[in-house]
Amino acid sequence: MDQLLKLKHTIDSLFGPNVSRYLPPKTKLILSKKTGRIRTAYFEDKLLCTLRIDGGLAITPYFAQLLLNSKKFKEHCLEVNEDAAPFVIEGRSVFCKHVVWSGKNIRIASETPVLFGGKVIAVGKAVLSYEMINDFKKGVAVKVRDNLKSRNGEI
């Protein structure tokens, strides 16, 4: 199977049908020398994502912003209030009390982009599911893994 097609199928299975159409057309894939599997995907020297050993994707804020054009992908995101945004941009975790909106497809341990003002400011792993984020007013909702500050604010 073509490696780019495999990446597209992975994106579609994780984030919804046809979300992969927002993958840039000239995406460059880096393969593992030992196994031949996809390790990372780049577009114009910008990292898009890294494939995990468990079949998941670790996406960057840049790639999440590209995928945000899809309404299905937006259901995997959550939005924070203006009090929390500066801290999330610094790489701090998102707490339930600062979430103003969350997508219905957020599950525990899923890849979750964090939005503020319609822009992706960070990406992390969900600690709680969509239902739990809406019900709780205390505790961590998303542990931020990658933020705008770590990427020098590129978007």
Image (tube, rainbow, N blue to C red):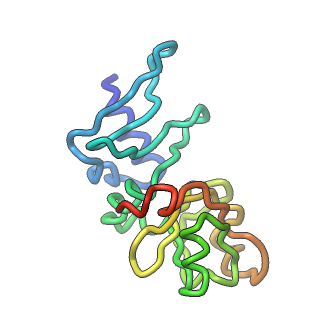
- Which x, y percent locates residue 27? 27, 39
35 relative to 55, above or below: above
Quick check: 95 left or right of 87? right
Q: Nearer the viewer, residue 98 or 73?
A: 98
Q: Image quadrant for the C terminus?
A: bottom left
Numbered disc total: 0
State left or right for residue 109 relative to residue 82: right
Quarter of the image for residue 2 reads top left
- Would residue 104 be found to the left or right of residue 63 on screen? right
Query: Where is residue 91 shown, x and y percent of the image?
Result: 60, 64
What residue is at 37 percent from the left and 62 percent from the top? 65
Tell me the residue at 61%/35% (across/down): 54
Residue at 43% x, 28% y: name it. Answer: 38
Q: Position of residue 116 (x, y in %)?
A: 47, 78
Q: Is residue 84 left or right of residue 23?
A: right
Vertical arrangement, residue 38 with respect to residue 146, above or below: above
Specify the quadrant of the image occupied by residue 144: bottom right
